Image (spheres, rainbow, N blue to C red):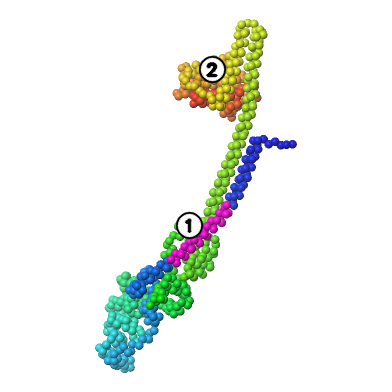
Amino acid sequence: MKRIIKPGTRLILVFILTVVVSGGILTYLSINSISNFKELTEKEVTEEQRLIVDQVSINFQKKLEELAGRFTSFVLKEGEIDWTALKICDTLDFIKNPFVISKEKKFFWPWFMEDLKVNTEEMHSTAFLQDFKKAEKREFQVRNYNQAANYYRASLNHASCKFDSAKSLNALARVNLKMKNNEKAYSYYSEITDKHFSVLDNNGYPYAYYAVLNLLKLSDSTNFIMVIKEIESFLLKLTSGTIPLNNSTAEILTQISNWEFNSRMTDDKQISELEEYIQKINSRIRFINNYGNIIKESLMSGKDSEYPLTLGNFNVINGISSDTAKIVLIDPDLEYPMGFCLELNQIWSGIKKSDYCENTEFEYNINLIEKEESNSQTNNELGFTTEFSSFFPTHMVRISLKDINLVDTYVKRRSWTYGIALVLLLGAMLLGVLLILRDILREKRLSRLRSDFVSNVTHELKTPLTSIHMFAESILLGRVKTTTGKKEYLNIILKETERLKRMINNILDFSKREKGKLEYSFKKVDITALVKSALHDLDYWLVEENFSVHTEIEENVFINADPDALKQAVINLLSNAIKYSRNTKEIFCKLIKEKDTINIVVEDKGIGIPEDQTDLIFDKFYRIGQNRGEETSGTGLGLTVVKEIVEAHNGRVLVESQINEGSKFTIII
Ligand code: ADP
């Protein structure tokens, strides 16, 4: 048997199918796109990180080149070393340990005495030497310090150069110390530090070194301020290079520090100045110890150097195990090769200042770490470690997301957005289906009501037509003899035709309204007369059916209205009251004038209206009678017409009703 699916059901099925299929596809796509999204985001993170690291490397290289250029332009004037500039160039924040190498591959700057053997013997005059040797004999063999002192003084008198003077002053100071003649010893030593500070003895030691050490020993509360002054000027001369450095300078600096000048001094500025001198000198000595040989070797090996890196004019020495965070730059092609040091941390802090995350979607941490350290860091997809400069192969850059959970949060947020959008979409689709379903049901009900309407109208027409036919025939066939009888029959025919007219008017008006063709013509209307006339029109039926009518009609009520339409509305209410009354045949009709409105009330004691249908009765074609098996006839258009007319007058219709108690309709305009 062939199963026939109704068009409505088919439409619903198609819709449900569409919702299910498209919902399914959308869900599948969303899940797919979310998992792709995670991958894409991680890829984006890695790409951004690569770009940033590249930028960091480029900036780092640029910074190095810039610093090298700045050093050269500061220190070299027309290809010649500007010594004044060189000596103060380490006050520039980036330059560490500037140096100049002599042709003999020795340190010109800082001035450092490497071979201590210097023969000063031939520099002395013979007259001086004669006395000096006699004095030495008295001092070391005879141990007659007085006589020794006398001969040393004589040698001082014969001194013909600074070497003579420094040598005899030093001996005088020494022999006076032996005689416990401290004051004299002190004055000789201070003369050395004042006048002959740069003179070396035949061991290559500056006399000033002996003098300073002994001045420290000779210091007491009386000469303390003087000693401080001597030390200060000694340190200044070491710093400025007028007294050379050598392998024992560090030891002297330790002695000075141990002397605890800082606990004896009160001037903080002076203390920090002395400490600064000591630090500076120590750093130079350390630099020469660490790098001296390497620098010299690199100069000797020339182009086959094991340090092939270059930066501008400079050869670069890097990766010195004691100090991997430092590079030494040497310009070997100058008459006096010169160079300086750069410290990684300092350059790094300079280039780190620029904001690499300015144009990126995510924020990153960029850190400098040592290679060994980098092994302990896991390389996951949200961060990695890589080399960034060939000058610092032992150091790496580590880049990672500032917020490790960021990608997950991102994905979660996106999932929620998709989820919500999907639910909304499906909801909207479902709502669409429900609305269509409702419309279909409504259309179905309406078509049922319409078909009921046709049979109702037929029935409605038939009853009055039958009586008209019957009464007219009776008169025609002469069955009614009396004039009163004839009149009565004709009256019935008239009333039935009036009823027919009213009904047809209702249908015609409704149809016109449906097409939007009905127009109202408003004018000032005597409502009192209108209501009375409506009652009068139905007089016949009221009497016929034995109704008792209670009226309460205010006089002289005027409003602007379409009189025919409004009367039709009142008649419709009255005829319903007649139609739907059973045993208690009572009708109340009132016209009440309120402050701003007029109320027309039609009330009966009839069958009443179920509460849940008080709204439906105003729908077109709707009849309750059909459902509750009443026999009253009707078209289901009476109240529809009432409502439309009243609304056209800017009014409304109220219903109060109780089953088997009666109904009350109020027109409020
Ligand atoms: P009709 O009277 O032609 O059926 P109406 O639109 O005038 O159509 O009324 C719709 C329905 O409302 C009626 O079928 C009837 O069941 C109910 N109704 C209207 N007036 C009354 C009333 N006064 N008392 C009880 N029921 C009423």
Image vertical order of residue 343 relative to residue 209, above or below: above
Q: Nearer the viewer, residue 88 or 230?
A: 88
Amino acid identity at mark 1? Thr
Q: Position of residue 208 (x, y in %)?
A: 32, 82
Task: Locate residue 651 relative to residue 213 in the image: left or right.
Answer: right
Q: Given the current orientation, which residue lies at the most extreme right position?
A: 1
Q: Residues within 10 Å of mark 2 (few under 14, many from 20)?
A: some
Residue found farthest to the front: 78
Q: Earlier in the sequence, mark 2 or mark 1?
A: 1
The answer to whether residue 98 shows anywhere in this view is yes
Q: Which amino acid does the dot numbered 2 rest on? A: Ala
Question: Disc 2 and disc 1: Cα gap in Å?
Answer: 84 Å
Q: Is-magenta flag for residue 46?
A: yes
Specify the segment rendered in magenta.
33-62
Q: Which residue is mark 2?
A: 534
**The quadrant where residue 275 appears:** bottom left
Q: Is residue 455 above or below residue 278?
A: above
Q: In the drawing, does residue 389 fall left or right of residue 206? A: right
Q: Give the tally of numbered discs.
A: 2
Q: Secondary structure at mark 2?
A: helix
Q: What residue sits right under mark 1 in the picture?
A: 360
Task: Between residue 365 and residue 17, name the one nearer to us.
Answer: 17
Residue at 39% across, 72% down: 96
Looking at the image, residue 440 sits to the left or right of residue 351; the answer is right
